[in-house]
Image (cartoon, helix red, strand yellow):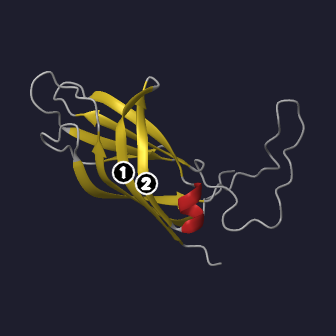
Amino acid sequence: MPSTSQEIGTLIVVVLKANHLPNKRHIGKQDPYCVVTVNGEKRRTKAIKRGGQHPEWDEEIRFMLYEDTEDPSESTHKDGTPPPIPPKSSRGPKKIKGGRNMKIACFADDPREPDFIGEADVDLTEVLTKGETDEWFVLSNKDKFAGKVYLELTFWSNVSA
């Protein structure tokens, strides 16, 4: 029986800028954009025409976050043992649907097929506990450095303390 997930807040991601992106164009400057993925939901920035290796987007993307309401008593390990009992004193939502990770990927826009520049996994634990954070995240492509992207992350909780 499917249960409805409770909305716990809004994650605001401001994709500000990037630097040291590898150039995917042989002639001219590339038109980079970013795709942000939270809980399987993808949103993208606009492509910066001739943004090259140091684009500036300053674009805000919002995601609603939901509590993971899957009944832990129904899920068992492969060997049949039940999962451990969660601690009673946990602040805020126990589990966030889709986990506490976000993915950001950068691409060079192309009319035929966009060129993948690099991606980073972003741990949302800090922004979910502090309410906001901003930092550079290192992009990689096949375990090689592919530039950095600067993000401002803000979490507005709907859950009363």
Q: Is residue 27 or residue 42 the one in the foreground?
A: 27
Query: Residue lying farthest right?
Result: 81
Q: Nearer the viewer, residue 145 or 6?
A: 145
Residue type beneath disc 2: Glu
The residue shown at (56%, 67%) is 130
The percent coordinates of residue 59 (x first, y second) are 28, 57
Pointer 1 local density, CA inside 10 Å: few below 14, some 14–19, many at least 20: some
Q: Position of residue 16 (x, y in %)?
A: 30, 54
From the image, which quarter does the C terminus lie in?
A: bottom right
Q: Is residue 78 left or right of residue 26?
A: right
> Is tag 1's residue or tag 2's residue first in the polypeptide sequence?
2
* SS assignment at label 2: strand
User: Which residue carries the number 1 mark?
Assistant: 150
Quadrant location of residue 78? top right
Residue 5 x, y percent position in the rendering: 60, 59
Q: Are marks 1 and 2 in contact (CB under 8 Å)?
A: yes
Q: Is 1 located above or below residue 109 in the figure?
A: below
Q: Judging from the image, what secondary structure is the residue with disc 1 in?
A: strand
Rate crowding at label 2 as few (under 14), some (14 to 19) or many (20 or more) other CA atoms within 10 Å.
few
- Using the rendered view, name the quadrant where residue 3 is placed: bottom right
Residue 82 is labelled as none
Q: Position of residue 39 (x, y in %)?
A: 52, 47
The residues bearing labels 1 and 2 have C-alpha atoms spaced at a distance of 6 Å
Q: Residue at x 14, y 21 (%)?
A: 26
Q: With respect to residue 64, does 101 lie above or below?
A: above
**Amino acid type of the residue that numbered disc 1 sits on in the rendered structure:** Tyr
Which residue is disc 2 drawn over?
Answer: 135
Total marks shown come to 2
